[in-house]
Image (cartoon, grey):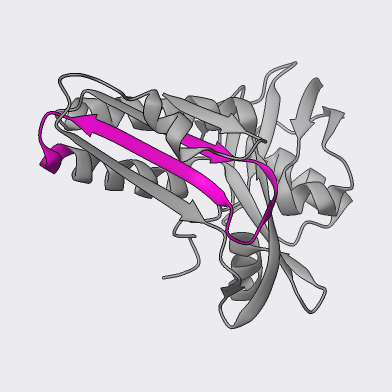
Amino acid sequence: MFELTDQPISPSAETSHLQNASAGALATFEGWVRNHNEGKDVDRLEYEAYASMAMKEGERIVAEAREKFDLLDARCVHRTGDLGIGEIAVWVGVSSVHRGPAFDACKYIIDQTKSRVPIWKKEHYTRGDAEWVACHECAQHAG
Amino acid sequence: MNRLQLRYYAQLREESGCSEESVETDAETAAALFDELSARHGFSLTCEHLKVAINDEFTDWSTLLKDSDQVVFIPPVAGGAHPCSN
């Protein structure tokens, strides 16, 4: 399942949702807020979601992963709002009988989520300015 | 003339100065609507950079608009390969 939350993500709480006596493998991915991007020092990030569509597209991605790979369970949780350095922006967890499908599905879910789910990231820099990341790159290339 | 509901996110929200607005328009397609609103709000992104969703589904820019449609122009997402990176 796919979730949006404006509260800190707890990996242990998320993992507990995937407990399954048949599972021999759990693969997880955590996307962290880092303190720099493209040479600029980052102070904090702001994530904004088009919630109804993000949920729909996120659920679709998790369902695709369950069709493509032999999984027991899968979840993806994405933060919204203001995040500080080191916080978890996105968490993916996948359980399966053997490790192969868990690794593959975990990568599929995070890659698809980052490219398809309508969630935008604004970087606030230590020098005081801020940018919507992908939008900014596009506006520059358009010039 | 259709009355449409617009919602704005990220850069488009900041540039329009609102999260949503109701618009009465003669624009027949999503592309024509974008041109009309871009002229009013001065968007820095053009429709080549954006996707469009009507009633929470991605659709084509040539889609004909109907009364009470909910329209969202979708800027490139944070981790995606944006269309100008080729």
Task: From the viewer's side, name the closer residue of A27 and A133.
Answer: A27
Relative to B43, is B17 on the left or the right?
A: right
| Above/below status of B59 relative to A132 | above
Q: Where residue A137 sits: x, y (%)?
A: 60, 69
Residue A60 in magenta stretch: no
Relative to A93, is A90 on the left or the right?
A: right
| Above/below status of A10 relative to B44 | above
Relative to B55, is A30 on the left or the right?
A: left
At x 66%, y 36%, the residue is: A7
Looking at this rendering, what residue extends furthest in the bottom direction?
Answer: A39
The number of discs equals: 0
At x 28%, y 29%, the residue is: A64
Task: From the viewer's side, name the closer residue of A75 and A120.
Answer: A75
Rendered-image quadrant of the N terminus of chain B: top right
| Image-quadrant location for residue B25 | top right
At x 79%, y 79%, the residue is: A127
| Image-quadrant location for residue A6 | top right
| Above/below status of A3 relative to A118 | above
Q: What is the span of residues highlighted in magenta in the rendered image?
A: A77-101
Relative to B67, is B18 on the left or the right?
A: right
Residue A87 in magenta stretch: yes
Q: Where residue A38 sits: x, y (%)?
A: 56, 78
Q: Main secondary structure of the magenta part?
A: strand
Q: Where residue B6 sits: x, y (%)?
A: 77, 31
Rendered-image quadrant of the C terminus of chain B: bottom left
At x 17%, y 32%, the residue is: A69
Task: From the viewer's side, name the closer residue of A28 and B26.
Answer: A28
